[in-house]
Amino acid sequence: AQSVTQLGSHVSVSEGALVLLRCNYSSSVPPYLFWYVQYPNQGLQLLLKYTSAATLVKGINGFEAEFKKSETSFHLTKPSAHMSDAAEYFCAVSVNTGGFKTIFGAGTRLFVKA
Amino acid sequence: EPEVTQTPSHQVTQMGQEVILRCVPISNHLYFYWYRQILGQKVEFLVSFYNNEISEKSEIFDDQFSVERPDGSNFTLKIRSTKLEDSAMYFCASSARGEAVEEQFFGPGTRLTVL
C-alpha cells in the first residue's frame, strides 16, 4: 500500500528565503508523485508531478521537486519565497494497480513573513 | 478556464439527516472523484466513478455513502444518515483519463458540519 508523510505541518520563511517542504513516500510499485497547492477558499491546484521521465521536475510559480528513490523523498523547493506563496501544500502518491487511488499527505501550511 | 464547482460551500445538518453534496466536473472529463479532509487531518480518498459505475472505493466509503451522476453535468455524493464524525471538508475532483499519472482538477470543497 502507498503512503505519504509530510514533515512539518507548518513552515515559516521570510520573503526571499528558500522554501523547502518535505515529503517522503512509501510504495511497493513505481509511484507517480504530485504536489498540489491550496489557496484559501479554493480547490487543490497541481504544482508539479513526477512521472519517471526526469527526477528533477519543474512546476508552476518557480517551484521544483526532486525525486530521490534511495531516500523515498520528493521534497518541494523554491529558491526565493514570495508573499503570494503562502498557502497549504499537499504531497500525493498514486500508482496503477488495475485501478488507482491517490493518497495525500496531511499538508504543510507555508507562512511567508515580510 | 474550466473549473470544478461545488455546492453548497458550507452545509450544516443534524446527526441522522441525509445530505447531498453536489459537484459539476469539467465538462469533457470522464472520471470523477470524492475526497474528504477532516479538520487537521489528511485528505482521504473516498471513491472514483467512471461510466456510471464506481471504479474504486476506500474503506471509508461504506453503505451510508453513495454517488450518482443524475444528469450530464452533476456528480453527487449522498450521505444517508450523517454522524458527527462525517464533519469534514469534502472535495470533488475530475480528470480526463482514469490513470494514476493523470492530473485531477479539484473543486473548492464543501464544508459539512454535523451537529
Image (tube, coloured by chain):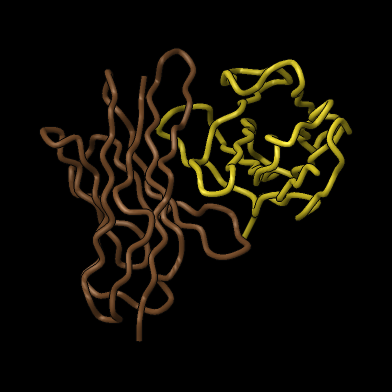
Chain colours: A brown, B yellow
Q: Position of residue A83 (x, y in %)?
A: 40, 79
Q: Is residue A93 above or below residue B112?
A: above
Residue ID at (60%, 60%): A42
Residue A51 or B84: which is nearer the viewer?
B84
Q: Residue furthest left?
A: A70
For this view, does A86 lie left or right of residue B21?
Answer: left
Total marks in image:
0
For this view, does B83 lie left or right of residue B102?
Answer: right
Q: Position of residue B43 (x, y in %)?
A: 52, 40
Residue ID at (87%, 40%): B14
In the rendered image, which quarter contains the N terminus of chain A?
top left
Q: Is residue B44 above or below residue A2?
A: below
Residue ID at (42%, 60%): A109
For this view, does B70 lie left or right of residue A31?
Answer: right
Residue B50 or A105: which is nearer the viewer?
A105
For this view, does A15 lie left or right of residue A102?
Answer: left
Q: Is residue A89 above or below residue A112?
A: above
Residue ID at (59%, 54%): A43
Residue A69, by quadrant, is top left
Residue A50, by quadrant, is top left
Q: Residue furthest bottom?
A: A114
Q: Position of residue A26 (x, y in %)?
A: 28, 28
In the rendered image, which quarter contains the C terminus of chain A?
bottom left
Q: Position of residue A77 (x, y in %)?
A: 24, 60
Residue B71 or A100: which is nearer the viewer?
A100
Q: Is residue B104 above or below residue B60?
A: below
